[in-house]
Amino acid sequence: MTRKKIENQYKEKINLLIKFNKNYYEYSDPIVDDGEYDKLKNEILALEKKYTFLKSENSPSKLVGFKPSKNFKKVFHRVPMLSLSNAFTEEDLINFEKKILNFLDKKNDYKIEFSAEPKIDGISASLIFKNRKFVTGLSRGDGTQGEDITENLKTIKDIPHVIKANDFPDEIDIRGEVFIQNSDFKNLKNKFANPRNAASGSLRQKDPDETKKIPLKFIAYTFGYEKNLSVNTQSKFLEKLNNWGFKTNHLNKVITGVKNLLINYETIEKKRGDLDFDIDGIVYKVNQFELQKRLGNVANAPRWAIAHKFSANSAISKIENIEIQIGRTGALTPVAKIKPINIGGVVVSNATLHNEEEILRKDIRIGDTVIIERAGDVIPHVVSVEKNKRKSGSKKFIFPKKCPCGFETIKEFNKVTKKFDAVRRCPDRGFDCDKMAKERLKHFVSKEALNIEGFGKKIVENFWDLKIIRLPQDIFNLNYDKIENLDGWGKLSASNLKYSIDLRKKISFEKFIYALGIRHIGLENAKLISKSLKSIKNFLSLSKKGNLNELLNIDGIGETQINSIKNFFSNKTNLNVLNELAKLLSVKDALILKKDGILSDKTFMLTGKLDGMSRAEAKSLIEQNSGSIISNISKKLDYLIIGEKPTKRKIDAAKELNIKILDQNEWLKMLNKTS
Ligand code: IVH
């Protein structure tokens, strides 16, 4: 064969590979199976080996660094996979129960049943069954979108492929934990640091035969979407799971009362070391589905469940230095750099000292021997100082009064507590303080905000140091020719980055607001604002107005949040960021869940106490039916709902404006419900 012919043949194969890749990675719609793909890849590699003059930047030999996650098709969860809030103490549990009782407007002595389930520390997965067949299996991903890992999940023996039982729902997403038993992990002798990593690594193998080699287990505990599921409690559901052929945890129990939850917690914690799988706490779920439904969710965790994490582990170490970190909101947080120490299987070398007052109160000094505690995923902290071990001549730690950027720090006055904050802050409101700016960029790309895959904290640091990025909009104006020539980068990784960034140019309005990183505007508040303002257009016009009082109408948004947004809008750089991003991104209008609900376009206000229902529940009921709650009486208000002991002033004001006044029954009738 002539050289020309060989080159042509090679080029042809490369072009075919590009086509396969495009369909697989960009359109998530592969046109060949894995076998054919691998065959082509090997042919190219063989040609390159034989004829060294063959070169292409699209050669599979250059494909190193391709992120494994790109190997799986992304699929939206029909019902999002939420996470759980954490509880650590008895007080946390008391609060959890209290909040539930308040929301449901139940008396303090009402007995709520909980399903208490050991929390296995593995990887969650969602298994979609249609007509009793396991059709698709997804990883959790970011909770909204997971990865299609069906083939890998099919290798797990605990997962039934076909269900025989007659009472199995027509459609259901069965959710549970994939994990590896400790005894199996010991026999593996592979590169994974712990069983959880082994499970996660194995599930993400591109080749299901590789997954098969690791004995993964599956325990089922909840569901997402369902059609025709006929049970009404979690404990019955767990029983059903067993009947249908799924494994469930044999330590699951139904319990009432915080005292009994604690007894169970202690019993299981004692057994923890004897179990053949890692558990890191107990999950409590309100047992009645009807109550779960009423309770609903906050941001990304249900109100009806909580994870009670196992108690902290502690160890003794020495403070080698105290560094001051500046957070996204300007808070100066002192961090103790300690002599690395293993606490419960994790090597700890940093411990938070919280704030200036904490250092003063505990008289923490550089060189001190201290007790460090680590609980769950929370940052380790210093519990106490072993003062008897302190060397003479040690000096008190002087907290810096200036931010490294040069600004004099401030302690804000809290109008509610009438005290100065314990936290010292850099007063910068925009991007002038380098440390804050960097943190704001990290927040911007983070999972809950833009969620740019492959653009993590390290890349922000790196691009910042190289002066590639300064403001959020710079992320969408990157010079990829420059990036591909940077250390550790290449053509392919640069184009992968571009791909991930472009993918996120389409963003929901609430995530956009959250991504801006305005103080006091977390996910929940961003959601409230987005629902009320509906589009970025309205947000931009608000930024031009000096007056943000219309936000006061949003139930849940108060003076603190409004002042913070005002502060944000008062900074020129912030306005520039806002306007540039609005041009570069396509911000989707707020999704109104049920636009056509019974209360569509109607506004409500509540006064007085309702019977058998908390204010929070009433609000969520109105919103579920497309109505909205406002907290000021104005012409915009359609209905004032009055309960027991209403505020007379509100009723008078409503009458004056001819606003319809409803009692609880009249309002429930509107919803086709009667109490
Ligand atoms: S229920 C909304 N039940 O804990 C309900 N989760 O932070 C969320 N987990 O991602 C899940 N055991 O991986 C539930 N019995 C159990 C669980 C459990 C372990 C994990 C799961 C989830 C995480 C929540």
Image: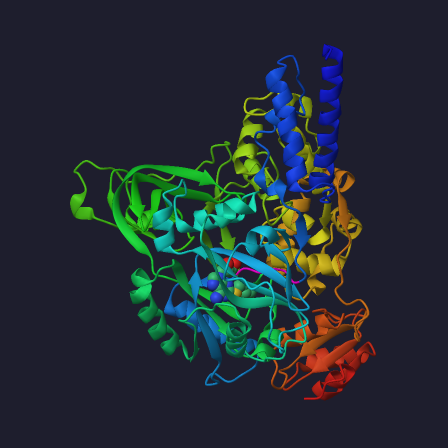
Query: Is residue 659 located in the magenta-colored stretch of the structure?
Result: no
Quick check: can you spot residue 142?
Answer: no
- Name the residue at 31% across, 39% down: 340
The magenta stretch spans which residues? 79-83
In-front residue for pair 467/334: 467
The percent position of residue 643, horizontal first and vertical second, equals 66, 84
Q: Say which quarter of the image contains residue 104.
A: bottom right
Q: Is residue 1 left or right of residue 240?
A: right
Q: Is residue 395 above or below residue 610?
A: above
The quarter of the rendered structure image containing the C terminus is bottom right
Residue at point 75%, 24% (across, down): 12
Depth check, front residue: 253 or 500 = 253
Left or right of 440? Residue 93 is left
Look at the image and say whether residue 80 sits in the magenta stretch.
yes
Measured from the top left, where is residue 421 in percent x and y? 46, 52
In this view, the residue in front, 295 or 103, is: 295
